[in-house]
């Protein structure tokens, strides 16, 4: 796309030259030509060289204003361009940056920042960083190289190092030269060293911290490591007191006398401060005695013989299949004997059951059968279970009122005493007070 735009600009230049040969230029054509020449000249930039020191914080700002000249101007001359621009950085020939170099850019309308602490291994080796700028409005790209020449520091590393955790700052805010200078000034007032350097800055998110909620202007937090050439002051040593260690274990603020020198601008979490004294660290390096790299002679390798004895797997087959099958057969026979040969039978059950219980059970079965038959045909005779079985006076068994072939279509819904045979007549009283049956 960028080449196509350049070809369009060259075509416009040739068209402008033809217009010049034909006659005087109009004002709009002259303005377009000047803008085109300015854009072409702005693309010619030399690579930047920087010279950081090993073990000292390196900060390089990718300014959007510096890359705006790489992209075509706005259609209307005179307008101030504020295109969204993002950056991509990588080591030349590799897809990512070196391990010690980090990059951050919050929004496409803010500058990008490269920061980190160079290592001693890269001293004397130029590190070429490719910087690609993307214009999110026109989708144009521009590329520059940043050559980092790492120099060796005279007093690297500084023997006394302290790492502070600042809760009310983000990493891009802390990387600003004014803010970082104010913090180093506050540390210098507390520590009183002859030489003080910022070694590294790390975001709390890179240490496993959580992204803060977007409320109350909460910050991510940042770790700042500084180094000095004198021992730690008494104020910094107060964190190691047993009382303050106990308060930190109970998630309470420790009592630090010099906290007021930071509180105006920086909120430091004193429970997360780390003090490292490199002068007291015992070196664990041991000289490695290198041998010839040859294992002791164990003789020649002897492969297994080709005349191996054949193995009979018949016994393994029997053990694997026959034994479980035999156990399953025995269990099956035991279950069959229990289920089939140990049953008492219906006759033995009836003999041990009282007669009255059998009568009740039979009546229930008979009533159930009648109800099922009634559900199939609503025109059948009344069920016998609804009629009296015993005579109310004599106690004799009363036969049913009708047989199964009895036609009940002419039977009234409610029968009177005259219609019911085998029923005792109840005496009735006359009006004169005499009884009759």
Image (cartoon, helix red, strand yellow):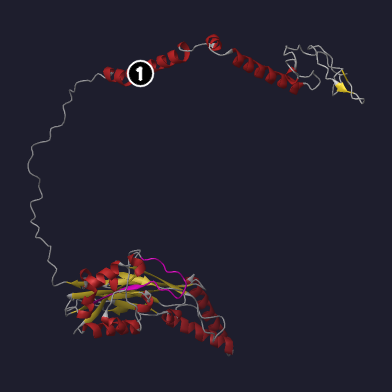
Tell how many labels: 1
**Element carrying mark 1:** helix
Quadrant of the snapshot with the C terminus: top right
* Residue 215 point in image, percent of width and height: 47, 72
> 17 or 112: nearer the eye?
112
* Residue 41 in the figure: left or right of residue 409: left
431 vs 366, nearest the viewer: 431
Q: Is residue 240 above or below residue 261?
A: above
Q: In the figure, residue 417 lies in which quadrant?
A: top right
Residue beneath label 1, please? 327
Crowd class of label 1 (few under 14; some 14 to 19; many from 20; radius 10 Å): few
Rendered location of residue 311, percent (x, y): 23, 20
Picture coordinates of residue 180, whole percent (x, y): 32, 81
Name the residue furthest right.
432
Q: Report the residue at 57% width, 83% height from top.
A: 76
In the figure, residue 273 lies in which quadrant? bottom left
Residue 212 seen in this snapshot: yes
**Residue 380 picture quarter:** top right
Q: Would you say the magenta stretch is mainly helix, strand or loop? A: loop
Which region shows up in magenta? 209-226
Considering depth in this image, is 46 or 55 the residue closer to the camera?
55
Q: Position of residue 261 (x, y in %)?
A: 30, 84
Magenta stretch: includes residue 211? yes
The verdict on residue 360 being magenta is: no
Q: Residue furthest front?
A: 433
Please give left or right for residue 71 compared with residue 76 in the image.
Answer: left
């Amino acid at each position: 796309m960028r080449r196509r735009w350049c070809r369009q600009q060259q075509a416009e230049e040739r068209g402008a030259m033809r217009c010049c040969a034909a006659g005087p230029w109009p004002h709009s054509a002259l303005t377009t030509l000047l803008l085109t020449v300015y854009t072409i000249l702005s693309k010619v930039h030399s690579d930047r060289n920087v010279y950081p020191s090993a073990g000292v914080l390196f900060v390089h700002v990718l300014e959007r204003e510096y890359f705006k000249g790489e992209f075509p101007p706005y259609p209307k001359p005179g307008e101030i361009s504020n295109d969204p621009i993002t950056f991509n950085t990588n080591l030349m020939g590799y897809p990512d940056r070196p391990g010690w170099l980090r990059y951050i850019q919050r929004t496409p309308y803010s500058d990008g920042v490269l920061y980190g602490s160079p290592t001693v291994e890269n001293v004397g080796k130029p590190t070429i960083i490719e910087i690609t700028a993307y214009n999110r409005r026109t989708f144009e790209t521009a590329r520059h190289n940043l050559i980092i020449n790492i120099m060796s520091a005279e007093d690297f590393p500084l023997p006394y190092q302290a790492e502070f955790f600042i809760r009310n700052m983000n990493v891009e805010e802390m990387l600003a030269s004014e803010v970082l200078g104010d913090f180093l000034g506050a540390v210098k007032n507390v520590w009183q060293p002859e030489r003080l350097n910022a070694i590294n800055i790390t975001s709390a998110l890179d240490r496993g911290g959580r992204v803060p909620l977007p409320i109350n202007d909460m910050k991510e937090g940042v770790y700042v490591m500084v180094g000095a050439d004198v021992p730690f002051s008494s104020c910094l040593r107060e964190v190691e007191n047993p009382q303050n260690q106990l308060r930190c274990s109970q998630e309470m603020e420790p009592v630090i006398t010099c906290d007021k020198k930071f509180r105006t601008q920086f909120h430091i979490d004193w429970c997360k401060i780390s003090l490292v004294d490199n002068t007291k660290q015992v070196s664990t390096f041991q000289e490695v005695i290198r041998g010839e790299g040859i294992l002791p002679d164990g003789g020649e390798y002897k492969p297994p013989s080709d005349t191996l004895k054949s193995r009979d797997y018949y016994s393994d087959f029997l053990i694997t299949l026959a034994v479980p099958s035999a156990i399953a057969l025995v269990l099956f026979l035991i279950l069959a004997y229990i289920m089939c040969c140990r049953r008492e039978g219906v006759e033995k059950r009836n003999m041990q059951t009282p007669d009255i219980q059998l009568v009740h059970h039979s009546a229930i079965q008979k009533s159930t059968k009648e109800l099922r038959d009634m559900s199939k045909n609503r025109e059948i005779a009344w069920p016998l279970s609804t009629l009296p079985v015993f005579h109310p006076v004599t106690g004799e068994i009363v036969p049913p009122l009708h047989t199964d072939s009895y036609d009940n279509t002419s039977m009234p819904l409610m029968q009177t005493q005259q219609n019911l045979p085998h029923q005792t007549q109840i005496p009735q009283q006359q009006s004169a007070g005499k009884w009759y049956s």
